[in-house]
Image (tube, coloured by chain):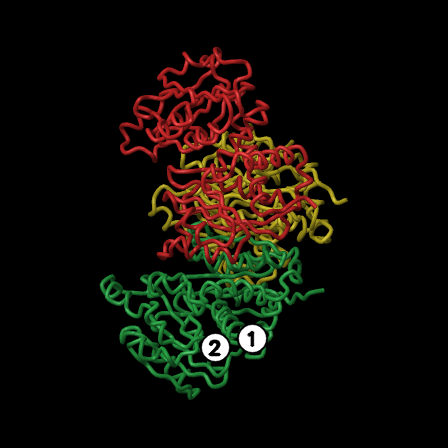
Chain colours: A green, B red, C yellow
Amino acid sequence: MKHIISPLDLSIQEMGEVLDLAMDIIKNPKKYCEVCHSKKLATLFYEPSTRTRLSFEAAMLNLGGSILGFSSADSSSAAKGESVADTIRVISSYADICAMRHPKEGAPLVAANFSSIPVINAGDGGHNHPTQTLTDLLTILNLKGRLNNLTIGLCGDLKFGRTVHSLINAMVRYDNIKFVMISPDELKIPTYLREEVLDANQIPYKEVKVLEEVMPELDLLYMTRVQKERFFNEEDYIRLKDSFILDAKKMKNAKEDMLILHPLPRVNEIATEVDNDPRAVYFKQAEFGVYARMALIMKLLEVEVC
Amino acid sequence: MKHIISPLDLSIQEMGEVLDLAMDIIKNPKKYCEVCHSKKLATLFYEPSTRTRLSFEAAMLNLGGSILGFSSADSSSAAKGESVADTIRVISSYADICAMRHPKEGAPLVAANFSSIPVINAGDGGHNHPTQTLTDLLTILNLKGRLNNLTIGLCGDLKFGRTVHSLINAMVRYDNIKFVMISPDELKIPTYLREEVLDANQIPYKEVKVLEEVMPELDLLYMTRVQKERFFNEEDYIRLKDSFILDAKKMKNAKEDMLILHPLPRVNEIATEVDNDPRAVYFKQAEFGVYARMALIMKLLEVEVC
Amino acid sequence: MKHIISPLDLSIQEMGEVLDLAMDIIKNPKKYCEVCHSKKLATLFYEPSTRTRLSFEAAMLNLGGSILGFSSADSSSAAKGESVADTIRVISSYADICAMRHPKEGAPLVAANFSSIPVINAGDGGHNHPTQTLTDLLTILNLKGRLNNLTIGLCGDLKFGRTVHSLINAMVRYDNIKFVMISPDELKIPTYLREEVLDANQIPYKEVKVLEEVMPELDLLYMTRVQKERFFNEEDYIRLKDSFILDAKKMKNAKEDMLILHPLPRVNEIATEVDNDPRAVYFKQAEFGVYARMALIMKLLEVEVC
């Protein structure tokens, strides 16, 4: 039995298999519409996240399975002081697979240690969010046709944004990847990523403060939300949140086939005027998120098309 | 693709088709139990409403479809500052149709403008609630056998009660409809309804303050709850909420086949002693609400019995 | 039509039938995977309880049925002042069976009086919780092979713990049952249970304050959580909550085939070091809870394997 706690829990080969399966699901969704018949997914969301939760639920329903769970800690046994270890042992009797979001880093890993069903980390604090990474990779693969030979711009909150960290970790495994980090000094990527991931793997990257100047180089621009809940005080948040807003004017210098990705929800870091640009693929990315999760659920449950 | 934001989004002919379909569903529910197999309904409730949400969910399950969604804004991405326009574009990838309740008037209309799946307004502030109106019409049609030649009493909060406004708008399209408005001065119907709907269509109506005196004239009595959340201060609410309570004594003067309708929840505006009167059809009306929504979902998804 | 409000609503014969059915479901779960196709369970939880709610939902999904409902009073019509009697009459149109948890004792009984679908009490205040009792009996029957000739230790909060009260009421109907009550003076079983149930049925029992001294006698040890919400003040709770903690050292004196049961959630009344003891069957008990509820739902809906 396999759990997915970090994006790197899938080897590059397994990741390839999941992505290939997702690509086939996109082409022939009907082929897969009953493969999880009589299987149940539990969505254990100790922290609200509509998008991620509904994406998992849509994925399981698309596979013919069913869903149960909770959408906030208030309505869970956590309020009565139960440990994650105990909860998952009980949930193991109720469902065949589970997706867990938790405000505490490491909670899904603890769950995995006590679970008798596959656990998928659906986001733990500022830590990991592997199905977002899987979604990002599927989007890139589907719309660029490759996962190597890419110059990837990462813009916004690179310090706290877990999706960015996970994406870096996942992309350094492919050939000829370059990163361009675009952020204010206060929101640069953490030192461990710089040293242990980028430098250790000899990945070329540069860090800039102005989006315009690097725009023409990028094959992808990954925008991120400046999340209020990650800040220590309101003042810093207000000062920094509007930096690095993408608008139609800035898009003029971008390559014709550059893709704009965003994990969503977007607040104002991408002006709505950009939405109709064919290069803006963030809503398509949300759609790919369902297919990525369908493939991952199938892989972990080891179900196949008959 | 069609959305239902206002009760008038269905022409009188389309309304007739939906009502006919609902009548057939009532007669042969089993015929329809798989027509939405592998279709998904998203219930997006930014404001809690158990009855309406569960009625939609029961409708979709009765059609063999499945459901996902959220039941309050706290557990949605709205808390992270996402716009309704962005949310619906993402939900469009997760579901085949959605029902949205929102405290802000107009939010479902905004959603419809950005959605690639049919949007049903499940109530927006004091504004519209088209499936309640559809339910009311189905109840009348089923139990009176007609939608014309009716004298309709409307009692209680006629100022803020959106179900009453929608019912007036819907019924003026049928022949020989008369209204009797029964309310305190403070809770009379708004001027725009009087001028633009009733007077403009030359619909006969009168306004009274005493329920007893008009009782014998009525073919239908539509009772409404005096909703606390619509008042500006507690004092007004307490002074007015008990006006116009229907009890067994008042029912003595009513026609033998008069119907009592109520959109529910009822607080105390209908004494429980009335519940066993065969003319009290408000719980039956709740049941018809499921059939009305089944028919509407089928119509919007353009599914048919094979 | 039958409702289950108290564990004693099932005669000893009916209880036997439900348990036999549950035993067969455990052996052949696939045989039952479609028996409730197109049936709907409504989970009406006016008080949060993840475990109980998800157990009911898993049960209904395992039977091929579907689920709808709410998980807290905030998102229900109760917030608008609707009575339980009105709510259940409406829910009767939405579902085929319902499970209700309510903070007020007696609320599910009121619901049953107005319902046209079977109502299962899923816990009402400190009162009844019949499906927990059914789960406990199934666990004992399955793992001990009998429901008679047992010495049952009950430990912890015996005053407020409804699961203990229900278990006593249920077990006194079988032959040769002895109870050993282990609790501080403040948390002894209520007088009515002592007089009207134990003494009235001439059931042998003793009351002690030290777990160790009675350990070797027990066939079963039923541990309970000291629930904070049942206490009148914080001080009493803190003073008493750690009494009577079960650990590996205390287990040394227990019979080799003694079973440890616990309704869960467990806080710290059982040290986690006990979890790997084969006699610790509380997580297995949670699993049996699903089978017990499957059998009960089938019984109340009168569905059978074709």
Residue located at (40% from left, 79% from top) = A218
For residue B263, above or below residue A128: above
N-terminal label among 1 and 2? 1
The residue singled out by tag 2 in the image is A170
Q: Where residue B274 sits in the image (x, y, percent)? A: 49, 19
Crowding at dot 2, Cα within 10 Å, few <14 / some 14-19 / many 20+, comes out as: many
Residue located at (40% from left, 29% from top) = B197
Could you say which disc has been placed on residue A15 in the image? 1
Element type at mark 1: helix
Q: Tell me the kind of residue under disc 1.
A: Met
Q: Tell me the kind of residue under disc 2.
A: Ala
> Which residue, as the protein is rendered here, is positioned at the far bottom?
A202
Element type at mark 2: helix
Question: Would residue C218 be visible to someone looking at this image?
Answer: no
Q: In which quarter of the image is the N terminus of chain A?
A: bottom right
The quarter of the picture where residue B95 lies is bottom right
> Which residue, as the protein is rendered here, is positioned at the far right?
C306
Is the Cβ of the residue at disc 1 closer than 8 Å to that at disc 2?
yes
For residue B179, above or below residue B134: above
Share a chain, discs 1 and 2? Answer: yes
Disc 2 chain ID: A
